[in-house]
Image (spheres, rainbow, N blue to C red):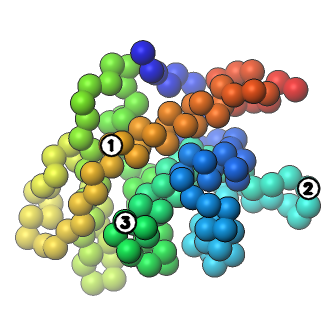
């Protein structure tokens, strides 16, 4: 049975390659988005010493950003606003559960003038956005994949604890 028990979602404990693997983006995409200011690392690297480090929340943000750019064709500069809203949402309580049952999680977005509104729901139609045009993403699979990949990375070689602290 899969269960995350000690993953600190806000700690900067994933390297750039780890983050790219979990979010499903290429090195070129990460570099381009970082250069354009679309994304920032949780803890930016300092010159040649130490690379960029990302938190699990930031990796989830990268995943949603990539979904919006690749699948919905929203420009990265616009999609980043949506991804940032989503990363700070209540997705963890819906995705990380001791007994995973079939799960539907919908990310629902609506744009009003220059602002995006966001809601996460277990049903695809939300009462909040019934009278406005909305973007609905079924995201349960992607949310779960990011969490599982982060957990797998933390339990990989050279990592002796579930908190992700290197044992070497």
**For marks 2 and 1 on the same chain, the one whose residue lies earlier in the sequence:** 2
Residue 158 in view in this figure: yes
- The residue depicted at 48 percent of the width and 55 percent of the height is 63
**Closer-to-camera residue (23/86):** 23
Mark 2 residue crowding within 10 angstroms, few (<14) / some (14–19) / many (20+): few
Q: In the rendered image, which residue does mark 1 sit on?
A: 140
Mark 3 residue crowding within 10 angstroms, few (<14) / some (14–19) / many (20+): few
Find residue 71 and name its label. 3
Q: Quadrant of the N terminus?
A: top left
From the viewer's perspective, is residue 54 above or below residue 157?
Answer: below
**Closer-to-camera residue (134/129):** 134
Q: CA distance from mark 2 to mark 1?
A: 37 Å
Q: Give the foreground label among 2 and 3.
A: 3
Q: Give the foreground label among 2 and 1.
A: 1
- Quadrant in the picture for residue 82: bottom left
- The residue depicted at 55 percent of the width and 37 percent of the height is 149
Secondary structure beneath disc 2? loop
Farthest residue in the right direction?
48
- The residue depicted at 38 percent of the width and 50 percent of the height is 89
**For marks 1 and 3 on the same chain, the one whose residue lies earlier in the sequence:** 3
- The residue depicted at 91 percent of the width and 56 percent of the height is 49
**For marks 2 and 3 on the same chain, the one whose residue lies earlier in the sequence:** 2
**Closer-to-camera residue (159/8):** 159
Secondary structure beneath disc 3? helix
- Quadrant in the picture for residue 155: top right
**Closer-to-camera residue (127/71):** 71
Q: CA distance from mark 1 to mark 3?
A: 15 Å
Percent position (x, y) of residue 133?
A: 16, 73
Q: Quadrant of the C terminus?
A: top right
From the viewer's perspective, is residue 122 above or below residue 63?
Answer: above
Q: In the rendered image, which residue does mark 2 sit on?
A: 49
Q: CA distance from mark 2 to mark 3?
A: 36 Å
């Amino acid at each position: 049975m899969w269960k995350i028990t000690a993953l600190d979602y806000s700690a900067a404990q994933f390297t750039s390659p780890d983050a790219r693997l979990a979010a499903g983006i290429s090195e070129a995409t990460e570099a381009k988005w970082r250069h354009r200011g679309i994304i920032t690392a949780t803890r930016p690297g300092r010159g040649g010493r130490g690379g960029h480090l990302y938190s699990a929340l930031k990796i989830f943000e990268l995943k949603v950003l990539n979904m919006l750019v690749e699948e919905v064709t929203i420009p990265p500069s616009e999609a980043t606003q949506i991804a940032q809203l989503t990363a700070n949402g209540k997705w963890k309580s819906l995705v990380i559960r001791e007994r995973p049952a079939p799960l539907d999680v919908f990310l629902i977005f609506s744009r009003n003038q220059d602002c995006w509104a966001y809601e996460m729901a277990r049903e695809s139609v939300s009462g909040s956005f019934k009278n406005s045009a909305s973007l609905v993403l079924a995201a349960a699979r992607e949310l779960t994949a990011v969490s599982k990949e982060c957990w797998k990375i933390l339990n990989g070689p050279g990592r002796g604890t579930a908190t992700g602290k290197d044992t070497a």
